[in-house]
Image: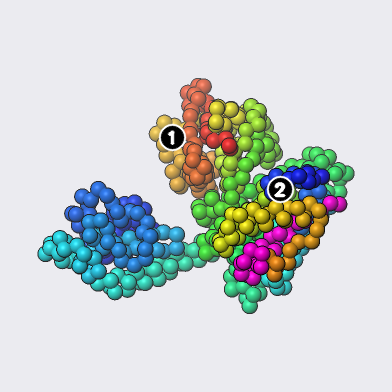
Amino acid sequence: MIELLKIIVPYPFAFRNSLYDGYNLKQSKYCKKCNEKFCFQKPSVTGVYACKNGFSCFPIVIEDDIIIINGLITPETRANFKGLRKETYKEYVITSEGLSQFQSQLSMLIKHVRQTANDQVKDSVAFLHDIRTSVSIVLSWCQQLIAKQQGASFEEQLEKVDKETANLFGSINLLEEQLNLADIIANYASITYGKKHKSGIHGFIFKMVKLFEPRAEKKSSKIWLYGKTNAEIQAYNSFQFIPLILLDNAVKYTYSNQEIRVELTDIDDHVLLTFKSYGKIVPHEYRDKIFEKYFRGPRAVKQNPHGMGLGLYIARLIAKAHGSDIFYKANVQSGDIGFNEFSISVHKAL
Amino acid sequence: MFSFHQKTFDQVKLELPFNEIRKRARILVIDDDEEAFPYGLLQKEGYNVQYWSKIETLRDLENGEFDIIVLDIFGVAPAEMSTNDGLGVLEHLKKHNPAQLVIAYSGQKYDLSQANFWSLADDYLGKPSSLITCKEKIDALLREKFTPQHYWSTAVKLMQESGVNGKQLSGFEKKLVKSMLKKQSQPSKEMIAQTLAISHHSAATIWVLIQSIAKFFITT
C-alpha cells in the first residue's frame, strides 16, 4: 500500500504513524522537526483542519485505512496562523477544492487497484471451489459410513470403526484444514476472521496430532504428545494452523523410524508448545531466514521441490496475531544431525 | 428449576442440561449446496436443525424464530432481496436484531470484498467442515451466547440508546423476570413502546429479544 501511495500522492502525507514525501512536494522542514506529530492522530473532524502549528491537515479515509495529507496551507487555516505566511511556504499553499478533487481521484484509484488485486486472487484460487465441493461429498459419505456404527454420538461411532476408515476420516479432515489454510495464503487478513474462542490447549493439540498420525505412520514414525495441562487459550480459528504447519514440517523432514515429540509445558500464565523432530538441522546461515516469505533452504528444495516457502511465514504471522512468536532451536546430536525444535509460548486465557 | 425470589436476569439461575439446550436451540442452515453441511447427522444427535437452500423472504428471519443461523455467503438470496447475497442478508439481520447468532459458512475467505461477512458474524465455519467441527462450533456458541443474559444485554443497550433511564430499565427488568418466572404472557410491542416511551421500531426489536429470553423459562 505504501509503495503505491508514494507513487501517486503528490503532497506530503502521514500514513500509519510515519511521514512520507509526496512525489511532487516533500515534507517541510517544519513538519520533519515537529515533535508533536499532531497529524498522526486520527482526526475527529472531516475535511481540512489545522494542526497545532498551523498547517492544514486533510484526512482521506480509504476503507479501513486513513491517509492524512499534512503540512499544507489552505485559505481556511492560513487566516488563523499568520506566522506561516512566509515566502518559503508558498509552494505548500493549496485550495481545499484542489484537495477534495485529489481525494476523490485517490479513492477511486485505490478502490480500482484493490478490486483488481482481489479479482486476481479470486481468479487464481477459484479452482479451489470445485475441490471443496468434491471434498464435501467425500467427507459426507465417509461420515455417513461412520454413523452406521452403534453409538450415542458420532465420536463414539468413530471409536468403533476399523482403523482404515478412521484413517480415511482423519485424512479428509487434514485435507479440509489444508483447504482452509489455502484461504489464509490467499488472504492474510483472514487470520483474524471470526471471534477469539477459549479452548483447552491439550485437546486442541491432541486433535491435530491425531490428524497427522496416518502420515507419520507412512514414514514408520510416531508422534508423541507429552505434558498434560488443563490450561485454556483464547485464540482465533487460525491458531490451529500453527500446529498444523509445524507438524506438517516435522513429518516431512524427520528421518524415518524416529519419533516426533510435541511437548506442552505449563509456565505461570503461559503454555509453551514445542515441536521436536529428528533429522538434518537447519544450517546456521538459514536460521533467521526460515520464517521469511518464499524462503526455501537447499534441503527443503531438494526434498520437496514444489513447496512455496510460506508455511513458517504464515505460522509466524498467526503467532504474532496472538501476541506471540515462533522460535527455532537446533539441538545438535552429531555433525549436522539432531533435533529441530520449534516453540511458541501462548498466554493462558483469563 | 427456578428460584422465585430472584429479581434480575443475572440472578435467575436456569439449570438447563446442555442436551436440553441443544434440543431447544433452533438452528437454521442456509446453503445452496444441500450436501455440504451435515444437518442430517446433527438432527440424529438431537440438535434442532432445519435446512433451507435459499431465503424466501427476510421477514422469516427477522422475528428471532431461529436461535442460530448458519449462513452461506453466495447463492442464498435473490438479487431483489439482497444486493450482496449472503453478506447483505447478514447485514440486514444484525441491523434488525443485533443479538441474532449467525455462523458464517463459506469456503471463500479469500474474497477481500466480502470481509464484513466474517467480522459481522458471531463465528465462522469453513467449507467443508466435518460433523465434529460443526458440533464444536455450535456447542461453543450455545455455551457462550445462547443465554438470557446475551439477549437482555442487547435489549439494555437498545433501550439506553433510545433514552430509557436506569430506573425505568431496572423496573422493566424486574417485571419481566417476575412474569417469566410465573409463566405469564409477555408485553406486546405496543405495551413496550408505551411503557418505555420509545419508538415502535425500537420496541419491535426489544419485543423480539424478550421472546428469545422467554424461551429459556419454558419448562418441558
Kindly report which numbered mark, 2 or 1, lies closer to the viewer in this rendering.
2
Residue placed at 58% from the left, 41% from the top? A234
Q: Residue at x 40, y 66 (%)?
A: A110
Asked whether residue B211 is drawn in magenta, I would say yes
Residue A317 horizontal/vertical position (percent): 49, 45
Residue A336 position (above or below residue A218): above
Q: Which amino acid does label 1 sit on?
A: Arg
Give the dominant element type of the magenta stretch: helix, strand or loop.
helix
The vertical placement of A294 against A52, above or below, is above
Q: State the residue in front, A217 or A89.
A: A89
Q: Where residue A333 appears, x then y in whole percent?
A: 51, 22
- Pointer 2 residue: B7
Residue A263: x and y in percent read 60, 29
Residue farthest along the top direction in this orientation: A334
Q: How crowded is mark 1: few (under 14 residues within 10 Å), some or many (20 or more)?
A: some
Q: What element carries label 2?
A: loop
Nearest to the observer: residue B33 or residue A202: A202
Chain bearing tag 1 is A
Question: In which quadrant of the rendered view does residue A41 lie?
Answer: bottom left
Identity of the amino acid at label 2? Lys
- Horizontal arrangement in the rendering, residue B2 relative to residue A39 (left or right): right
Q: Mark 1 points at which residue?
A: A287
Q: Mark on residue A127?
A: none
Q: Give the range drawn in magenta.
A: B193-220
Q: Quick one: label 2, few (<14), some, or many (20+) residues within 10 Å?
A: some
Q: Say what secondary structure mark 1 lies in.
A: loop
Which residue appears at 48% of the width and 29% of the height? A329
**Colouring of the image:** rainbow
